[in-house]
Amino acid sequence: MRYEEFTIEGRNAVREAFRSGKVIDKLYVQDGCQDGPVVAIKKEAKKHDTVIRYVTRERLDQMSGTGKHQGVIAMAAAYEYATVQDILQAAKAKQEPPFVILLDNIEDPHNLGAIIRTANLAGAHGVIIPKNRAVGLTAGVARASAGALNYTPVAKVTNLAKTIEELKKQGLWFVCADMGGTSMYELDMKGPIGLVIGSEGEGVGRLVKEKCDMVAAIPMKGNIDSLNASVAAGVLAYEILRQRSSL
């Protein structure tokens, strides 16, 4: 099942979107706007645990396609999100140890789409993204995934570090990509595994990194010091696939 991605503008339209159960990735609200209808929309957003961003009227005008946003614009998801349990169930259905890719600070839709595509091809059972400071399942992400979104479940969680703790209790080990780590060729990444990838600029956040069991570095011979996030995810995902295939 999928949702059509669109921008919802105007107070009545946004309120109805929440009431009808549409998946809203982000709500943009004009900073300082305290009208009754806007306050009601914000309450609705909080009830659904939707990320709220406060922006200037000029920013909303730039985002608006109709010019009639009335101080609120909602961004709906292009695809339905899975749950973490759905991902574990997908592994169970294939009778394979779970292989999950977790993304921290990935805000570029092309990177997210490319990683979902790689996840599918490398045999990962799903991708987990955080609600904050991350791109959602937009149409751009769907295009970049080249159809992989139809087959690879993506779950959205409030707290990535807490999700890692919960998955550890279910037997998963976690490896985090970082240049200061051990060469990926020296690590044992077989069995139930979670691969954590951060953005090029910020990498994996400290709290998330501390929850990981291993830190993997990709050997590099060139003159620059980092790979694009989706390329790094691809290199590590295929090393995990190689190790799992040799079982």
Image: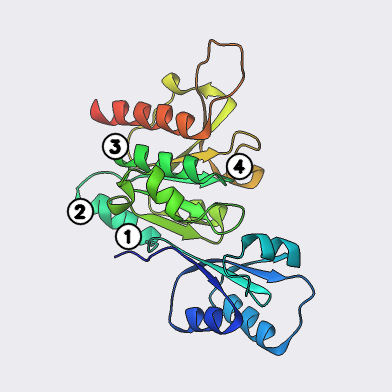
Q: Position of residue 204 (x, y in %)?
A: 60, 40
Q: Nearer the viewer, mark 3 or mark 1?
A: 3
Mark 2 or mark 4: which comes first in sequence?
Answer: 2
Determine the CA span between mark 1 and mark 4: 26 Å
Mark 1 or mark 4: which comes first in sequence?
Answer: 1
152 to the left or right of 53: left
- Residue 1: image tag: none
Q: Nearer the viewer, residue 60 or 226?
A: 60
Mark 4 or mark 3: which comes first in sequence?
Answer: 3
Q: Amino acid at mark 3?
A: Leu
Q: Position of residue 189 (x, y in %)?
A: 38, 31
Examine the rendered structure and indicate whether residue 64 appears above or below residue 69. Answer: above
Q: Which residue is mark 2?
A: 93
Mark 2 or mark 3: which comes first in sequence?
Answer: 2
178 to the left or right of 98: right
Q: Residues within 10 Å of mark 3 (few under 14, many from 20)?
A: some
Q: Residues within 10 Å of mark 2 (few under 14, many from 20)?
A: few
The C terminus: image quadrant: top left
Q: Are marks 2 and 4 in contact (CB under 8 Å)?
A: no
Determine the CA span between mark 3 and mark 1: 19 Å
Q: Which residue is mark 4?
A: 210
For the point 45% across and 63% down, the residue is: 77
61 to the left or right of 123: right
The secondary structure type at the circle numbered 3 is helix
Determine the CA span between mark 2 and mark 4: 31 Å
* Residue 247 in view here: no
Mark 2 or mark 1: which comes first in sequence?
Answer: 1
Q: Amino acid at mark 1?
A: Asp
Determine the CA span between mark 2 and mark 1: 10 Å
- Residue 121: image tag: 3
Determine the CA span between mark 2 and mark 3: 17 Å
Q: Amino acid at mark 2?
A: Ala
